[in-house]
Amino acid sequence: MTRRPGFWWQRPAFFTMTLAMLIVVFVSSAVVRDRVYAVTDPETQLLYIPSGSVLDRMALSFDALLADVYWIRALQEYGGTRRSEDDGKTYALLGPLLDITTTLDPEFNAAYRFGAIFLTEAYPNGPGRTDLAVALLQKGIERMPDRWEYYMDIGFIYYWWVKDYELAAEWFDRAADVPGASWWLRSLAANTLAAGGSRESSRMLWTEMYESADTEWIRNEALRRLTQLQALDDIDQLVVAARGFLDREGRPPLAWRELIDAGLLRGVPLDPTGRAYELDNLNGTINVSTDSTLFPLPGESLPPLPQ
């Protein structure tokens, strides 16, 4: 007797095609929703499934596609929150979205490296979660221990944000031990231990990052950090001018115009992006404008205005 074929909905080819169509519809709906509604409820931004491991089991062979969806959601979460002017804005979903993305696609290099940069950015331009950034990169190392860039990125986090120079040097050394790593990492580790925290050491570190960057985004980020260091050099010189005014007038300057009229400045000082520096008498500091792409400057203390 001839065996009867299974029902049409039980055939693997039909099931796979149907699931693919459902995912396409799901992604398309999310895109349309994001265009129509500028703001979504926080509960919906995780696309309803907050567990990467659960979603990975449900995704079958479409985990890479869903990883792309969650990566786009992570970019939306970071970019949208950063642009928001809400005083109570939060990046609470950024970490979970990145974790789900890298669970669905454990070799998603951009999600590890860019995601770590997003997480470390100081508030209000980011969540300032160096702990989550390190954990994300360590997750990448567990999957791809031969990616020396992840070790180096952790070293950068401890150097630039945490200011633990001994631990930063340890991670630079670990990066140098990985076959194929850049030759300068060993000298970077030694320099970090010898002069960690100095502006020249920071400048060398970001210059090396700029020259070895494998993507334009990371190269631009390194250039921004170098420009921030240039702004700190400018501020040092402006403090010297303010001290000269104090010596001459017996009081600190109240505005740039006073320094210009006294012949101590040629004009209103501008940061490297073309924004005027702010002279804040209330706080006794000179800083970049909050409108500048260089704000906030790194965690180094700004030199106080002479009083």
Image (cartoon, rainbow, N blue to C red):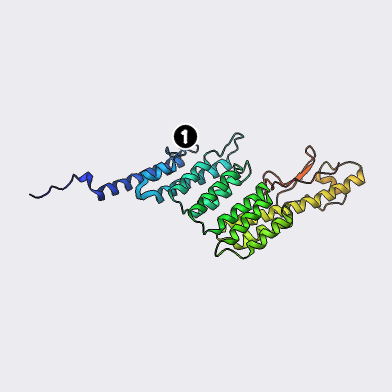
- The residue under the point 62% across, 41% down is 124
Residue 118: percent from left, percent from top: 57, 47
Residue 262: percent from left, percent from top: 88, 49
Q: Quadrant of residue 47?
A: top left
- Residue farthest left in this picture: 1
Mark 1 burial class by Cα count in 10 Å: few <14, some 14-19, many 20+? few
Direction from residue 46 to residue 199 in the image, left or right: right
Residue 156: percent from left, percent from top: 63, 53
Direction from residue 121 to residue 140 in the image, left or right: left
Q: Nearer the viewer, residue 232 or 212?
A: 212
| Residue type marked 1 | Glu
- The residue under the point 59% across, 35% down is 86
User: The C terminus lies in which quarter of the figure?
Assistant: top right
Direction from residue 109 to residue 122 in the image, left or right: right
Q: Is residue 91 above or below residue 178?
A: above
Direction from residue 72 to residue 230 in the image, left or right: right
Q: Is residue 71 above or below residue 149?
A: above
SS of the residue under disc 1: helix
Residue at mark 1: 43
Q: Nearer the viewer, residue 183 or 100?
A: 183
Residue 56: percent from left, percent from top: 40, 45
Question: Quick check: can you spot residue 73?
Answer: no
Number of numbered discs visible in the structure rendering: 1
Question: Quick check: can you spot residue 84?
Answer: yes
Q: Nearer the viewer, residue 254 or 48?
A: 48
